[in-house]
Image (spheres, rainbow, N blue to C red):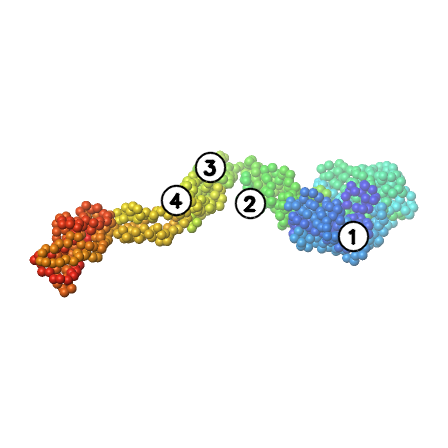
Amino acid sequence: MKIGKKSWVLGSIIVLLLTAVLVIWNNDISLIRGAETETIVKTRTTLEEDKLLIDISIPNPESGEYTFDFEGVDEVTAETIEAGIINKDEDKVAVLDNGDGTSKKVVFFSEDAQSFDLTVEVQKSDDSEQSVIRLFDPKGGLIVERNLDFTALAEFSAANELRTGSWSGANVFPTDSISLSDVFRSPIGSGPNLMDEGRVLQIVGGNSQTGAIWSKRKINLLRDFSFTSYIYLGNGNNGTTTSNSTVADGITMAFQNDPRMETTPNTVVGPGGAGLGIYSVNSANSSNFIRNAIALEFDPFNNGNIDSNVSTSGGHIAVMIPAGRNDQSANRTHHGLLVAPTNSATAADRMSNDTWRTLDIRWDAATRTLHYTIDGFGSNSYTVANLNTAFGGTSVYWGFTGATGQLMMDARIAMTEIPGNTTHDLKVQNITQSSAIDTTVKAFKNDTVRFTDSIVPDEDAILSGDGASVVINLPEGLAYKSGTVFFDGNPVDDSQLEISNQTIKLSNLQLTTSRAYDLTFDAEVTTDDDDISLATVVEVFSASGAAWGISGEAVVTIPNIGSVTFHYLNDSGTPIAGVNSKTIYGELGEGFSESPQAIPYYTYDRTEGSATGNFTDTPQTVNFYYKRNQVSLTVRFVDEEDNNLRTPITQLKDVVSIVDLTGDTAITAVIDDLLGDHYEVIARPDDEDRLEIPETNITVKYVFKQTDISSVLTVEFVNEVNQVLSGYTVTIDAQIGDTINLLQQPNVTAQLANLETAGYEIAERPSNETAVAINAATVTVQYKIRGLLSLTSVPSALDFGSLTYNATAKRVENPYFDENLVVTDTRASAEDGWHLTATLSAPMKNQDGKILNNALRYVYNGDETILDSNAVPVYLNTTGAAGVLNISDTWGDSAGTDGVKLQIESSDIVYTGDYVGVITWKVMAGQP
């Protein structure tokens, strides 16, 4: 952490607060969940005893409630938390007291809250032995538990007598300074002393000291660099008096290329006193100065004639050029002079006022200018006219010199950034062409090239490598490919990059070890030009923006090229959606060969043009044609039992296409037809208006059920020639959807009985007789009936009464009979009629067995026939008319009429008794 330079000019109270906060900085990463979601808690001491500042950072908070629980501290209100939110956005973050009387507070995050940073001050409770902060995530999980230490600042203040109102004391220095132990060579002479593990360099610290300390490595003056430091310039009067309180003589920060550095570097130091360990100030030591150098001097003591062009006794800063004699007689010149705000050697804002100040030094290589700014003095600069004249080269060592005599000076410097250097090994590879990795590769438009760099900071750079940046400079014609940056083995999200035109910058890097840091990134060749070279370089900068190093060029060369464009078309010749044309490039004369690519849901068909050949100066075009894959879509129309109600419709459809069944007229026509037949749709295919066709055959169904409407069941009785028998048809009222058992219908069973009585027999019953499905407005079933020719009634007795025989002829014309003689003909085909015969199957006998012969006669149409054991036709039906004929209705009771007659002749031998005989009647189809 660096103290902000602007803060120092706000006054002594502000200086104290900033210093006190930064002097004791206790960092604690309480929980790390990964680079993207780490939750960090830090504590900072304050000037007031038993108070701490707590910093909480949640980079990617979840949406929900984060709960803070403070233990052993005075009550922390929700208002305090809300006031401490650094990046507060009321649309994303809200703070509420949980209302249960404890110190828990709740922070709410919305869905798109990107980060959360909070600083809150807490006061230790008087009666508390332990103080703790806990942080819970939205699921109630403990993600941070931190014990709070309130003692560090009090102990530091007591040990260093830290006083309110100023940052005083040589031993009170900022803890963010870096160690300089590996930067410098061994000190020369007396004075330079690395203290506090190298984090403070005491340049002089007593009487009669003269010394110098130089860097191990040179700085390249052809590149920008920066130093960021805090400097302490003693405690005492600045002036020309020789009192014990006077501070003298002074120090310099020098840049030199003294030839002795290569042979006897331990001799590179100048005289003491006013020579400040770098100048030659009189004729006696006119050769004892540091060559090829400039010195930025910090001089609290006015040496009279030597400093005759400095009008103040408060101390001054200036650039001096070491020479043979740096005194008044040699026209000692102060370049870029800065003087203390006061002319008094004893005023509070004198140079040696027991105060640490910020010191920033920046070299601008382009203008060869050294810029310097020191708190309390301001800024100035010095421009070197010619590097070779001034330094004898373009690189220099840097370091500090100082001297004291009878008077003493305690001068110290603490540095937070020093110039560094990086080496690079930038190379490039054509990924598309699978080329080798080299500093130069050949590429064509649309090729992807990958750059790799191995960045190695030198040992000086690692001391100030926190916050460095890497800048990638791409030429026009190469375009950075998003998401391809990797640094030190880790991916770098584009949101963490500063991308501007052809520059990609990675910031806040920690180059804190002298080792290789690998950088990779990809770019695409976008130029339409050929026969050109595109050079890329990588630069590294310090946190202050000073250049640390630049790579050599990695070059992509574009030769003289030709192009071939491949189009991917469907069978109708239009581009396939989602498949871009492909253009390949190659050097003229080189061969190419391209195969049709596999395209989902399509099958390659043919090629138009040459997919194999050589690149020419005329662009070439090749068309690859494809056919869309198709599958069968079957649409079924079924009832609730999955029975087809109509013939299914099958169509070919493109795979992975969207089909609107509701707009298909063939399908809607079937649906309308079923609706007209009193069906209703009870289930439709999912997404029927946007049905996605899969890669395999698909079947979908419309499910229907019959609507609740009336129906009439007609039961017909059909004879053997398929004629419906009139008068026997039965109708039954029903509802569509019913099932009817005809044998449970009384009117049906009654008709069946009537038919049998009428002389019919049941030839065939309906197959669904016991379960007739009512599925339409009218339903008809039929019984098959067969007609019969039969005697449906015959007399069981013919009674001729009693006769008295007296040897005379006797005749009975009208016997009594109990039943009619009836012939029924129900046959459908009766054209040939029928005839009736009578046979005396048992002769007439009395009780004594005496037979009465030839007595029974039958008269038909005036013809009389004697009945005997032979069948005698007694009635003919020649008209073929079917129906019921009561033959006995034709019998008469007088002579000559039809019927059965009894006649006894006078010559017959007759015995007394009751005579009984049997007549058998028989009806037969056709004529005799």
The Cα atoms of the two marked residues, 2 and 1, are separated by 62 Å
The Cα atoms of the two marked residues, 3 and 4, are separated by 54 Å
- Callout 1, which amino acid? Asp
Which of discs 1 and 4 lies nearer the camera? The answer is 4
Which of discs 1 and 3 lies nearer the camera? The answer is 1
Q: Dot 2: what SS?
A: loop
Circle 4 residue: 777
Judged from this view, the residue extending furthest toward the left is 907
- Which x, y percent locates residue 638? 42, 47
Q: Return the disc, 2 or 4, that comes first in the chain's sequence.
A: 2
Mark 2 and mark 3 in contact? Answer it, CB < 8 Å: no
Q: Dot 3: what SS?
A: loop
Q: Return the disc, 1 or 4, that comes first in the chain's sequence.
A: 1
Instruction: Give the label on residue 74, or none.
Output: 1
What residue is at 82 percent from the left and 52 percent from the top? 49
Instruction: Give the label on residue 574, or none.
Output: 3
Q: Return the disc, 3 or 4, that comes first in the chain's sequence.
A: 3
What residue is at 17 percent from the left and 50 percent from the top? 893
- Which x, y percent locates residue 812? 15, 54
Which of discs 3 and 4 lies nearer the camera? The answer is 4
